[in-house]
Image (cartoon, helix red, strand yellow):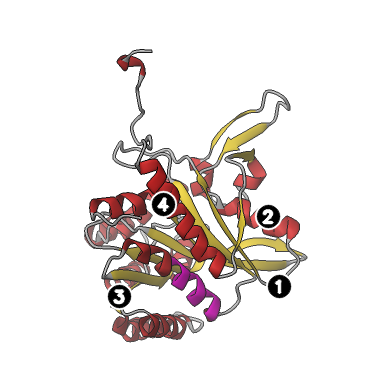
């Protein structure tokens, strides 16, 4: 072996002595938090049958999951890009309780277009199945905040919203997948002028365009919920207690954690597309993206009944290197 043989692909890391031990210690601390909160730890495999990896009907997962042929069985299998579908499968197969809680940790692989993005995150997370009220959402967000607080950051921004409104609006536009993808990119970048031009070119009605624009424009601290409620009323959009639920969740979080600020964003679509209602993310100072994301989703349907769930995940490597930069030793 010589130096030229030691090639590391872009977006891939080695953990060398020192960092490897510190990373293991951080992993143990996160697992301790999950265990303290009664989350059962499971370890699904990094390579699995495709139905176990693509069980949430997500085009994001379809695009990100690398598939290949198992030489022994001749069947197509996959390298996971998200552990959440496997946890949903575990709940479906083995759990009989009305409410169940699972935590997990493991490597995933996500193809990226940029060498600055990590291709092999170490995903850690937690899921509640049978989630059917606001207390479960508050529980999972609180668990997410407690995990991030290991970084000892003195200020965290928790962004919450509900993607059901904007998803319903997008579905009413009847766009093909290519145009929908373009629109989602514009929404996430808050590029209102480009969005108006794009939808006008597609001959979308002015009222639908203005509804989308207003939904994107109104964001900020949780006091903007009143403005969102008025906007929904103006456009005669039934919000099904969405605004009051978000206010309740924000009030509880602010009461429980002095280190957080709450931001409301009803057009947050940068989480995975299987989320159906509540969506949330955590941001920390001097970090270029959300350090943790999560939300509600439908895990599966059994006997015509939907099994609702709420969960979060993060790349533990992000948390580790953030702490290392700040000289916060595990």
Task: Look at the picture and state if 155 lies above or below 71.
Answer: below
The alpha-carbon separation of the residues under discs 1 and 2 comes to: 14 Å
User: Going 34% across and 37% down the picture, which residue do you hit?
Assistant: 113
> Is residue 175 or residue 303 the one in the foreground?
303
Q: Earlier in the sequence, mark 2 or mark 3?
A: 2
For residue 160: magenta? no
Residue assigned mark 4: 316
Residue assigned mark 2: 90
Task: Look at the picture and state if 86 lies above or below 148.
Answer: above
Residue assigned mark 1: 98
Q: Earlier in the sequence, mark 1 or mark 4?
A: 1
> Quick one: label 3, few (<14), some, or many (20+) residues within 10 Å?
some
The alpha-carbon separation of the residues under discs 2 and 4 comes to: 22 Å
The alpha-carbon separation of the residues under discs 1 and 3 comes to: 33 Å
> Is residue 186 or residue 98 the one in the foreground?
98
* Percent coordinates x, y for residue 280 in the rendering: 41, 67
Task: Look at the picture and state if 132 lies above or below 90.
Answer: below
* Percent coordinates x, y for residue 38 in the rendering: 59, 69
Whether residue 204 is visible here, answered yes or no, is yes
Q: Give the farthest residue toward the top.
A: 1
Whether residue 315 is visible here, answered yes or no, is no
The alpha-carbon separation of the residues under discs 1 and 4 comes to: 30 Å
Query: Which label sits in the foreground, 1 or 4?
Result: 4
Query: Which label sits in the foreground, 2 or 3?
Result: 3
The alpha-carbon separation of the residues under discs 2 and 3 comes to: 35 Å
Q: Is residue 87 left or right of residue 322?
A: right
Residue assigned mark 3: 259
């Amino acid at each position: 072996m010589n130096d030229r043989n030691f090639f590391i692909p872009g977006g891939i890391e080695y953990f060398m002595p020192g960092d490897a031990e510190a990373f293991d210690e951080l992993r143990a601390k996160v697992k301790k938090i999950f265990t303290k909160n009664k989350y059962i730890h499971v370890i699904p495999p990094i390579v699995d049958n495709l139905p176990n990896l693509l069980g949430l009907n997500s085009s994001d997962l379809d695009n990100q999951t690398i598939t290949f042929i198992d030489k022994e069985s001749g069947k197509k299998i996959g390298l996971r890009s998200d552990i959440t579908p496997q946890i949903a499968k575990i709940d479906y197969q083995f759990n009989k309780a009305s409410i169940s809680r699972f935590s997990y940790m493991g490597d995933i692989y996500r193809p990226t277009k940029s060498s600055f993005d990590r291709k092999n995150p170490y995903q850690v997370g937690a899921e509640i199945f049978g989630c059917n009220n606001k207390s479960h959402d508050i529980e999972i967000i609180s668990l997410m905040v407690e995990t991030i607080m290991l970084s000892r950051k003195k200020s965290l921004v928790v962004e919450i919203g509900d993607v059901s409104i904007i998803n319903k609006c997008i579905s009413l536009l009847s766009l093909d997948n290519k145009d929908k993808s373009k629109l989602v990119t514009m929404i996430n970048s808050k590029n209102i002028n480009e969005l108006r031009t794009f939808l006008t070119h597609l001959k979308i009605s002015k009222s639908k365009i203005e509804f989308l624009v207003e939904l994107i424009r109104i964001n900020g601290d949780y006091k903007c919920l009143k403005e969102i409620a008025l906007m929904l009323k103006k456009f005669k959009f039934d919000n099904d207690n969405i605004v009051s639920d978000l206010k309740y969740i924000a009030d509880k979080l602010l009461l429980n954690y002095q280190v957080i600020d709450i931001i409301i964003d009803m057009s947050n679509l940068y989480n995975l597309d299987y989320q159906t209602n509540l969506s949330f993310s955590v941001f920390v100072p001097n970090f270029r993206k959300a350090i943790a994301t999560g939300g509600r989703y439908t895990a599966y349907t059994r006997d015509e009944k939907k099994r609702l769930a709420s969960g979060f995940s993060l790349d533990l490597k992000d948390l580790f290197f953030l702490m290392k930069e700040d000289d916060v030793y595990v």
